[in-house]
Amino acid sequence: MTLGLTPKAVPEVVAFFAGDGIKLNLIHYLAEGGASRGPVLLVHGAGARAGFFTPPVETSLVAALLAAGYDVWLENWRASIDLAPNQWTLDQAAIYDHPRAVETVLRATGAETMQAIIHCQGSTSFMMSAVAGLVPEVTTILSNGVALHPVIPQSAFAKLRITLPSLHLLVDYLDPQWGDHADTLIGQLIKAWVLGTHRECDNNVCRMASFIYGTGHPTLWRHENLNAATHEWVRREFGKVPASFFQQIYKCIKAGHLLGVDHLPALPRDFGTGPQPETGARVVFFAGTENRCFLPESQVRSFEYFDRMRPGYHALHLLPGYGHLDPFIGEHAARDVFPLMLAELEK
């Protein structure tokens, strides 16, 4: 099975530098006959990579966008496992990564505006860029999972509260790959705990990811939504996530909205509580009703915030039977989810 791409897709890697000098890249997919519509930027979540959008399904989101005539760009920002591990924050990505990615795409395509589809911490950090007015060329944003108001299950919050004070003393990173290859004593101890308490499947990376990202069994998807090839494929698609991220997201969850932690002048301190966001983009929020990583209430709250600012302009889609990642990698996402996304882009 191919990675859900049409045979006419021609990928290329386009390197660019973040505002603080880190070398990043974009994976560019353009149908052989060219694009009849403008560019769309896809932004992955924490501890993943751009290839997340090309799982082994019959039709990936990339393939669906290409078939609809879009010029497709996948951003490997500083959280990507294709880059060297680093202690990143959402602030850094918002200021240094996403604006430069947008600038690179527009310069390469000659377009004046573009659209974006963003997921998880790619979504939170990109929304920080948008709210701060750093990506004014982006006219439509499709956000999945979480945006400005992270809400997690009480059990996951309790786990964070208990473990976070000692996390940075024990490890610099948490790594789902420990499920298969735990190369440190801490990794081996965590692996032993996870394999003893998570018995929902026989994929150790899947089980480790469920432990790292929450308290679900599983946390990131519903198993019944993944085909066998995709469930095996995820074994390679998750890597190190820094302690710096968990420290920041815990503060945000406690506050009920995103907080800047680096005190950089280009960003406000609080997100999702203050005055009119400095973006004219139409934002469409997607949430799986079975999401156990970030509860659907996360996207409901962000939609309500934007809807108060501009009633009737933005939109919210709750996806029955879907979790956190399966709206993109689910076996039937091309039937259940992608048509909604394409319709919103066309608006």
Image (cartoon, helix red, strand yellow):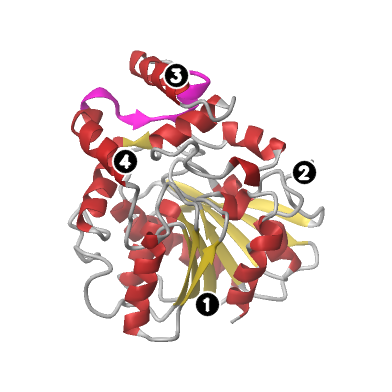
Disc 4 or 3, which lies upstream in sequence?
4
> Which residue is found at the position 39% from the left and 67% from the top?
300
Q: For mark 3, what is the residue?
A: 196
Q: For this view, does 263 lie left or right of residue 229?
A: left
**Near-viewer residue (70 or 237):** 237
Is the C-beta separation of discs 3 and 2 under 8 Å?
no
Query: What secondary structure is found at the residue carrying circle 4?
Result: helix
Q: Earlier in the sequence, mark 2 or mark 1?
A: 2
C-alpha distance separating marks 1 and 3: 50 Å
Q: Nearer the viewer, mark 3 or mark 2?
A: 3
Q: Which residue is mark 1?
A: 113
Identify the residue under disc 4. 155
| Mark 3 residue type | Gly
Foreground mark, 4 or 2?
4
Residue where numbered disc 2 is placed: 2
Q: Is residue 59 above or below residue 274?
A: above
The stretch of residues the image draws in magenta is: 169-181
